[in-house]
């Protein structure tokens, strides 16, 4: 019974780490796109 509990906790831990890494990857992709757009001048207030 103890082995089952340990394996279940290990699976939950690895699953949580996997979700965190996946979310972090998407955040980095979005940040990179926003950085490139700001570097090209999109979103900048233009003076008349």
Image: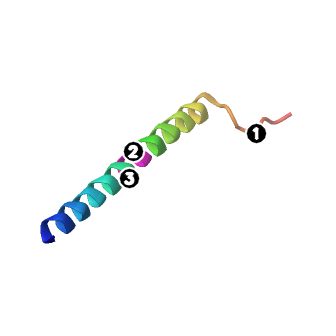
Q: CA distance from mark 2 to mark 1?
A: 34 Å
Which quadrant holds the N terminus? bottom left
What are the residue bounds of the magenta stretch? 20-24
Q: CA distance from mark 3 to mark 2?
A: 5 Å
- Residues marked 3 and 2 touching at CB (< 8 Å): yes
Residue 33 lies, in percent from the top left, at: 53, 34
| Residue at figure coordinates x 14%, y 71% from the top left | 2
Residue 7 lies, in percent from the top left, at: 19, 60
Residue 22 lies, in percent from the top left, at: 39, 44
Query: In this rendering, is residue 4 above or below 17?
Result: below
Label 1: how many Cα within 10 Å (few below 14, some 14–19, many 20+): few
Q: Secondary structure at mark 2?
A: helix
Which quadrant holds the C terminus? top right
Q: Secondary structure at mark 3?
A: helix
| Residue at figure coordinates x 41%, y 42% from the top left | 25
| Residue at figure coordinates x 54%, y 31% from the top left | 36
Q: Which is more toward the observer, 13 or 5? A: 5
What is the chief secondary structure element of the magenta stretch? helix
Residue beneath label 1, please? Answer: 45
Residue beneath label 2, please? Answer: 22
Q: CA distance from mark 3 to mark 1?
A: 35 Å
| Residue at figure coordinates x 57%, y 38% from the top left | 34
Query: In this rendering, is residue 30 above or below 10?
Result: above
């Amino acid at each position: 019974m103890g082995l089952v509990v340990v394996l279940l906790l290990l699976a939950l831990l690895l699953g949580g780490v996997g979700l965190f890494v996946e979310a972090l990857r998407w955040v980095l992709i979005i940040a990179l796109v926003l950085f490139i757009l700001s570097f090209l001048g999109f979103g900048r207030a233009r003076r008349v």
